[in-house]
Amino acid sequence: MSEVKTAARSRRKVRDGVVVSDKMQQTVIVVVQDLKPHPLYKKVVRASRRFKVHDEAGICQVGDRVRITETRPLSKEKRWRVQEVLEKAK
């Protein structure tokens, strides 16, 4: 049974992004930017998504680069958790 749990945890999505808001308690908003080719014209376009991320310790500040991991639903819109802070804001 533990093999199944380990395999499921290794398949969790991981993203790197930048914290743009830390005004909520234990929650930060992280913007993840991605480069994707346009479906018709093939030009590479920058797409960005905003995720509400759980920050239990409250260590993230605006401008920090963080790595986030997918997790079980923690609230209505919160499905990600801060895994580590890659770089603190200057």
Image: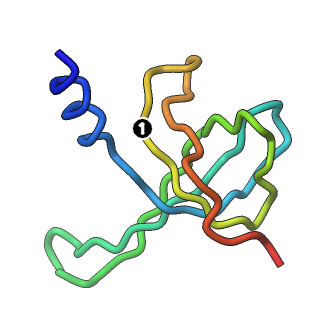
Quarter where residue 9 is shown: top left
Residue at image coords 48%, 20%: 73
Is 8 or 40 nearer to us in this picture?
8
Question: In the image, what residue type sits under mark 1?
Answer: Glu
Q: What quarter of the picture does the C terminus occupy?
A: bottom right
- Above or below for 84 versus 63: above
Q: Position of residue 67 (x, y in %)?
A: 53, 57
Residue at image coords 56%, 18%: 76
SS for tag 1? strand
Residue at image coords 61%, 39%: 53
Residue at image coords 28%, 71%: 36
Q: Position of residue 64 (x, y in %)?
A: 72, 65
Q: Position of residue 25 (x, y in %)?
A: 82, 31
Is 67 or 47 nearer to us in this picture?
67
Q: What quarter of the picture does the N terminus occupy?
A: top left
- Above or below for 1 versus 5: above
Residue at the disc numbered 1: 70
Classify residue 83 as left or right of residue 20: left
Q: Position of residue 88 (x, y in %)?
A: 75, 69
- Badge 1 crowding class, 10 Å Cα cut-off, few under 14, some 14 to 19, many 20 or more, is some
